[in-house]
């Protein structure tokens, strides 16, 4: 089964606005938000991107949604496998965007071809308070994608909207349709956001920390809705979170990102139980423990220092300045300083970008 | 599921509903109520103005030395000041008069039978009226310590086509019977019926008789300068001073038609193929609702015309300014880059061009070209619009900049919404409350600018409040204490501005709840 989405060496660099002199002498500096990321999302899979704030998870998602400026995509490509019909249409109007006869290169689509692809990829945003227009009714919000893509007559659209609202458990739909965002709770808003993404029946749903701004008590309602939709509609979900415990709860595979790069990627169980990268270990250890007797025990999180700036990424392994394993493994230090480790498959389906497991394996 | 059908309503219904809601909201505030009441008054007056004033009123107003203005008293106070106890003689207009007597007179003595006052005034010395003679009489009561400006007689000749008007001559003779018994001949005239002219008090006609009667030792030349005082006054100190003579006056108008057979004339009058409408106007020192200016123009009409002009110009200019500013500001903020750069540099230029000198320049150039009325006004307003959208554009740009990075805009992009959809559906609606407040606030701006220009001497030729004020200033209305010339347009300008400022504050409070005091 071929993957639905293939991201290959994607680089998104944002230029820093500098003075005139710097521009004239070509001294451009960039925030390297995403610095060479490769992964795949399989059909009907839930794929998780985990990492701390500022590591480039959201930028990756926005890049896949084609929401970043094309000029900021400094390298790599994102390939998406749409429905055959959509593929045929794109092949007709823009044959150069089709790769291998099955995939569409997202950054080559323009105009109408771009619109066709957008229909198949939808996104849920992090902030349920900001991602829906406060001046539009729920009906207008959920209907908008249908109008944009010219789907259905008015009566049909009302039916589709009602079904989408039912699917996200905003029942009875008639009652919710006429409401405005300020009359809804955070969880309800986020489900409106999900309903909006659903009306187009996308193949791939990007969920950018959809529950991180919700109260813990209502997270489950959104997560359950997503889980159920995945089953009933056969969608793939790319889930972005900073919470590795949450990732394990809902994802098939997890990729851990650090400073614009994926440092480890494997099945969720594997990655939690046998983490190979020191950063992954630090993330897992940082998960709070609800067991009362562990509460007062001092836990050691194996990491030091602060996240470096994405403008000046350390030479060699970018995690080296914060790495505890670097200090305790003097034999590997020469590699860490010299060269950045690639993302190597050390076991079947378990990729890691750290010299220690790589060198041990060799 | 009927409720699902009603989710979307007719946009007009939605608009009306929201407008009604807005009105109700405004009515909750005292300021808003005051503003709305004044605005309603302005609108009613505008409707009344449009309904009653003729289309060529501006041109009529410009031609101040033509009828109807020259038939009015000059610098007359408003009529209602009489009830406040201010001494101002009233203006009486007697129109659609029917002759009290009309007959053919061929013998000299006959005039005494139908107009004994003629004999009393002139005896039999003069060539008395003969031919077909009509006598009109009206009474006028001088009840306050004041004189009368003039006694004006206006003729309007209507004849069927076969009447040769140039052959019929009309002799006009006006007598004034004073309360003291003196009968003065105050004016006379003679013209053929195709060239009738109004007749006014003529000092040359009455001076000799007057000096004789009161045995004054003044010259005819001296009488010339005091003629209207003399006619309605009593001389003191040998004619050097006068006091008004109060009481009942009677104006007798004797018209005699000659030139063709008097019987023929009588027949024409009888069958209606010839008709002479006579209007006698005793011009006092008070007239109309708001008095008159130095040229006799009825200030109420001038001020009345100002209502629709103020509303139209105020709203059009404000609307155009805000719309241009809104669209360009949003485009500038949303697209950024070169578009932004171009628009912002343009804003820099127009915001820094001094508007008033420019307007004066344009105004003078309009005047020298002889353009007047609505076209001239339109050019001035266009200049105001072109140079005043900058402020709105700067603010809406910054608002658009912050809105465009909102997640719901990003979400709209993600579903594939077009740029125009994002701008018009997601960004501009957020700016509507702000622009509404700005719109309301900037309505008086154009009118104030127009008034300023007028007072500075730029004549666009429309009777506006500013124009009336400017006329008052240019003709020394203040020096003559003509408060009725200055206060009404001035107060209306203030009231107009106040209404919109009050509404603007209220709207601001409604759209920006942080400003609410309670």
Image (cartoon, coloured by chain):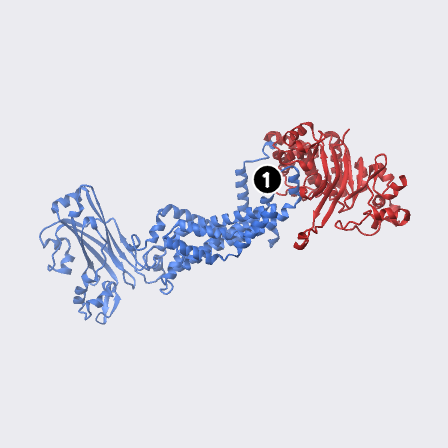
Chain colours: A red, B blue
Residue A57: x percent and y percent?
A: 75, 43
Give the number of marks: 1
Measuring from the top left, give residue B231's x and y in whole percent: 23, 63
Which residue is painted at 18% across and 46% down in the image? B165
Q: Residue at x 54, y 38 (%)?
A: B11
The residue that disc 1 covers is: B421
Q: Quadrant of the C terminus of chain B?
A: bottom right
Q: Residues within 10 Å of mark 1 (few under 14, many from 20)?
A: some
Quadrant including the N terminus of chain B: top right
Name the foreground residue: B372 vs A190. Answer: B372
Q: Dot 1: what SS?
A: helix
* Figure check: B64 above or below B209: above
Is residue A172 in view from this perspective? Answer: no
Taking the spot 87% from the left edge, 39% from the top edge, the residue there is A273
Q: Which quarter of the figure has residue B139? A: bottom left
Residue B186 vs residue B462, the one in the foreground: B462
Where does residue A238 sit, x and y in percent of width and height? 75, 37
A283 relative position to B340: left or right: right
């Amino acid at each position: 089964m071929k993957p639905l989405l293939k991201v290959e060496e994607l680089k998104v660099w944002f230029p820093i606005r500098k003075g005139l002199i710097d521009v004239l002498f070509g001294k451009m500096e960039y925030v390297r938000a995403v610095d060479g990321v490769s992964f795949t999302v399989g059909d009907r899979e839930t794929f998780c991107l985990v990492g701390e704030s500022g590591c480039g998870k959201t930028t990756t998602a926005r890049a896949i949604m084609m929401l970043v400026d094309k000029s900021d995509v400094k390298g790599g490509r994102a390939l998406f496998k749409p429905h055959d019909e959509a593929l045929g249409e794109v092949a007709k109007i823009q044959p150069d965007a089709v790769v291998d006869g099955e995939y569409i290169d997202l950054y080559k689509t323009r105009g109408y071809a771009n619109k066709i692809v957008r229909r198949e990829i939808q996104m849920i945003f992090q902030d349920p308070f900001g991602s829906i227009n406060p001046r539009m009714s729920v009906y207008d919000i959920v209907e908008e994608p249908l109008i944009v893509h010219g789907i259905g007559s008015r009566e049909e659209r009302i039916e589709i909207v009602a079904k989408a609202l039912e699917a996200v458990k905003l029942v009875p739909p008639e009652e919710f349709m006429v409401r405005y965002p300020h009359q809804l709770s955070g969880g309800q808003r986020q489900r409106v956001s999900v309903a909006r993404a659903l009306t187009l029946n996308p193949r791939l749903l990007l969920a950018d920390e959809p529950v991180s701004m919700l109260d813990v008590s209502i997270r489950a309602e959104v997560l359950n809705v997503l889980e159920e939709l995945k089953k009933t509609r056969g969608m793939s979900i790319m889930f972005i979170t900073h919470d590795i415990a949450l990732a394990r709860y809902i994802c098939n595979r997890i990729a851990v990102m650090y400073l614009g790069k994926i440092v480890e990627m494997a099945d969720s169980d594997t990655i939690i139980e046998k983490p190979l990268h020191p950063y992954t270990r630090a993330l897992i250890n940082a998960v709070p423990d609800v067991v009362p007797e562990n509460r007062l025990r001092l836990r050691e999180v194996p990491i030091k220092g602060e996240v470096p700036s994405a403008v000046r990424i350390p030479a060699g392994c970018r995690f080296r300045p914060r790495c505890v394993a670097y200090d305790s493994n003097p034999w590997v230090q020469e590699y860490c300083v010299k060269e950045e480790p690639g993302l190597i498959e050390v076991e079947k389906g378990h990729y890691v970008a750290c010299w220690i497991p790589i060198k041990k394996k060799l | 599921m009927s409720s699902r059908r009603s989710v979307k309503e007719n946009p007009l219904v939605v608009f009306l509903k929201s407008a009604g809601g807005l009105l109700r909201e405004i009515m909750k505030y005292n300021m808003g109520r005051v503003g709305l009441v004044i605005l309603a008054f302005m609108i009613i007056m505008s409707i009344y103005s449009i309904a009653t004033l003729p289309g060529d009123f501006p041109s009529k107003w410009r031609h101040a030395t033509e009828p109807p203005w020259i038939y009015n008293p000059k610098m007359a106070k408003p009529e209602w000041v009489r009830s406040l106890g201010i001494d101002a003689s009233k203006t009486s207009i007697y129109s659609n008069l029917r002759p009290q007597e009309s007959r053919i007179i061929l013998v000299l003595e006959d005039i005494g039978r139908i107009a004994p006052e003629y004999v009393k005034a002139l005896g039999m010395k003069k060539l008395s009226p003969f031919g077909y003679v009509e006598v009109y009489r009206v009474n006028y009561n001088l009840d306050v310590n004041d004189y009368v400006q003039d006694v004006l007689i206006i003729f309007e000749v209507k004849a069927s086509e076969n009447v040769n008007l140039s052959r019929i001559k009309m002799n006009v003779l006006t007598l004034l019977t004073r309360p003291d018994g003196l009968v003065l001949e105050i004016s006379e005239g003679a013209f053929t019926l195709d060239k009738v002219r109004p007749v006014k008090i003529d000092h040359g006609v009455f001076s000799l008789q007057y000096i004789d009667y009161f045995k004054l030792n003044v010259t005819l030349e001296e009488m010339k300068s005091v003629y209207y005082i003399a006619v309605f006054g009593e001389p003191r100190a040998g004619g050097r001073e006068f006091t008004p003579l109060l009481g009942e006056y009677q104006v007798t108008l004797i018209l005699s038609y000659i030139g063709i057979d008097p019987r023929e004339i009588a027949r024409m009058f009888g069958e209606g193929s010839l008709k002479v409408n006579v209007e006698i106007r005793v011009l006092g020192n008070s007239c109309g609702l708001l008095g008159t200016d130095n040229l006799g123009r009825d200030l109420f009409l001038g001020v009345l015309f100002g209502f629709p002009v103020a509303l139209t110009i105020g709203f059009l200019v404000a609307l155009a300014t805000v719309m241009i500013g809104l669209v360009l500001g949003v485009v500038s903020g949303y697209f950024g880059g070169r578009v932004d750069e171009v628009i912002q540099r343009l804003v820099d230029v127009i915001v820094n061009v001094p508007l008033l000198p420019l307007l004066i320049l344009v105004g003078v150039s309009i005047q020298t070209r002889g353009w007047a009325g609505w076209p001239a006004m339109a050019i001035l307003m266009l200049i105001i619009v072109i140079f005043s959208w900058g402020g709105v554009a700067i603010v809406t740009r910054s608002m658009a900049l912050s809105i465009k990075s909102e997640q719901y805009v990003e979400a709209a992009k993600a579903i594939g919404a077009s740029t125009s959809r994002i701008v018009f559906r997601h960004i501009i609606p957020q700016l509507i409350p702000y622009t509404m407040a700005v719109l309301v606030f900037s309505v008086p701006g154009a009118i104030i600018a127009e008034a300023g220009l007028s007072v500075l001497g730029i004549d666009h030729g429309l009777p506006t409040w500013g124009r009336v004020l400017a006329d008052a200033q240019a003709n020394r209305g203040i020096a003559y204490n003509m408060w009725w010339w200055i206060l009404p347009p001035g107060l209306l300008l203030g009231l107009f501005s106040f209404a919109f400022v009050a509404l603007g504050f209220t709207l601001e409070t409604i759209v920006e709840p942080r400003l609410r005091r309670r």
